């Protein structure tokens, strides 16, 4: 039995297999519409989510399976003090596979330790978000045709952004990866990520403050929101939330084939006027998330 707690839980060969399966599902969705008949997905979401939870549910329903679970800790026995370990022991008897999102880093790992069914980390604190990473990889592979030799600019909240942390961890395994890290001083990537991942893998990167300066060099611009829920005080959030906003003026500096990705939700870090630019693919990216989660569910249940 395999769990997906980190994007590194899949080798590059296994990742390639999941992405290939996702593209097959994109081409022939009806072929997979009954693969999970009689199977149940439990969605245990201890913090708010729209895209991740609904895309997991859509994925299982598209496969012919069913879904049970909760969308907030307040509507579960966690509000009574029940531990994650006890919850997953119980849920293991109700479902065949489980997706869990939790505000505390490491909670999905704890769940996997006590689970009798495959666990998928749907986001834990500022740590990992492996299915978003799979979605990002599928978007880049499908639209750029490759995952190697890409120059990616990560912009916004790089300190608390678990989607950024997960994607950097995944991309350092592909040859020719190069990164620009665009953020205010207070939201720079954590030291451990710089030293233990980027430096350890000898991946070239540059930390910059002005987005326009490096736009012409990018294959991918990965925008993120400045997350209010990750701040200890409101003053810091208000001071930094508008630090980097992508608009049509900045897009003029980008190459014709550059892609703009965003894990969503967007607040105001991408102006709505950018949505009509064909290089803005973040809504396609969200749609790709259903296919990649379908592929992952089939893989973990060994139904592919």
Image: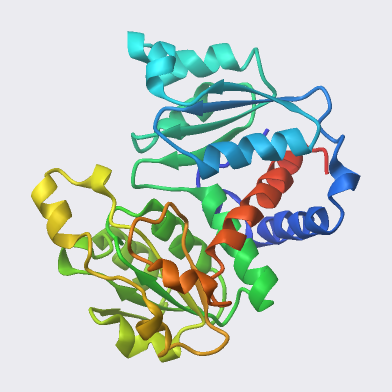
In the rendered image, which quarter is residue 13 located in? bottom right
Q: Can I make out residue 46 in this image?
A: yes
Most extreme residue toward the right is 31
* x, y percent for residue 114: 52, 21
* x, y percent for residue 18: 71, 54
Image quarter hosting the N terminus = top right
Determine whether, in the image, residue 277 is placed left or right of residue 60: left
Q: Residue at x 30, y 70 (%)?
A: 245
* x, y percent for residue 184: 20, 69
Residue closest to the eye, 143 or 122: 143
Image quarter hosting the C terminus = top right
> How many labels, in total?
0
Determine whether, in the image, residue 292 is placed left or right of residue 83: right
Most extreme residue toward the left is 235
Q: Residue at x 31, y 81 (%)?
A: 211
Q: Looking at the image, what colour scheme do you see? A: rainbow
Determine whether, in the image, residue 10 is placed left or right of residue 265: right
> Is residue 23 shown above or below 180?
above
* x, y percent for residue 279: 55, 77
Q: Can I make out residue 81 in this image?
A: no
> Is residue 19 shown above or below 222?
above
Residue closest to the eye, 25 or 7: 25
Residue closest to the eye, 16 or 158: 158
Residue closest to the eye, 197 or 53: 53
> Is residue 137 shown above or below 295?
below
Q: Residue at x 24, y 62 (%)?
A: 191
Q: Residue at x 49, y 40 (%)?
A: 50
């Amino acid at each position: 039995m395999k769990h997906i707690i980190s994007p590194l839980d899949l080798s590059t060969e296994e990742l390639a297999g999941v992405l290939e399966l996702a593209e097959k599902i994109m081409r022939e969705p009806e072929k997979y519409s009954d693969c999970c008949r009689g199977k149940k997905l439990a969605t245990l979401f201890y913090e708010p989510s729209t895209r991740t939870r609904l895309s997991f549910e859509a994925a299982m329903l598209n496969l012919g399976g069913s879904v049970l679970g909760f969308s907030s800790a307040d509507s579960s026995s966690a509000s009574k003090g029940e531990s994650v370990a006890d919850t997953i022991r119980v849920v293991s008897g109700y479902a065949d596979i489980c997706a869990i999102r939790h505000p505390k880093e490491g909670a999905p790992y704890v769940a996997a330790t006590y689970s009798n069914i495959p666990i998928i980390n749907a986001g834990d604190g500022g740590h990992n978000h492996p299915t978003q990473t799979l979605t990002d990889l599928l978007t880049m592979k499908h639209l750029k045709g490759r995952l190697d030799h890409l120059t990616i600019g990560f912009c916004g909240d790089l300190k608390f952004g678990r989607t950024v942390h997960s994607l950097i961890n995944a991309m350092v395994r592909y040859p020719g990866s190069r990164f620009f890290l665009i953020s205010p001083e207070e939201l720079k990537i954590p030291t451990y990520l710089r030293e233990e991942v980027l430096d350890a893998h000898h991946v070239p990167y540059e930390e910059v403050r002005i987005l326009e300066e490096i736009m012409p060099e990018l294959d991918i611009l990965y925008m993120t929101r400045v997350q209010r829920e990750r701040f200890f005080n409101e003053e810091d959030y208000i001071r930094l939330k508008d630090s980097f906003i992508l608009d049509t003026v900045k897009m003029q500096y980008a190459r014709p084939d550059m892609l703009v990705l965003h894990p969503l939700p967007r607040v105001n870090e991408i102006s709505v006027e950018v949505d009509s630019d064909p290089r803005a693919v973040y809504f396609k990216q969200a749609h790709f998330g259903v296919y990649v989660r379908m592929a992952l569910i089939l893989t973990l249940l060994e139904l592919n």
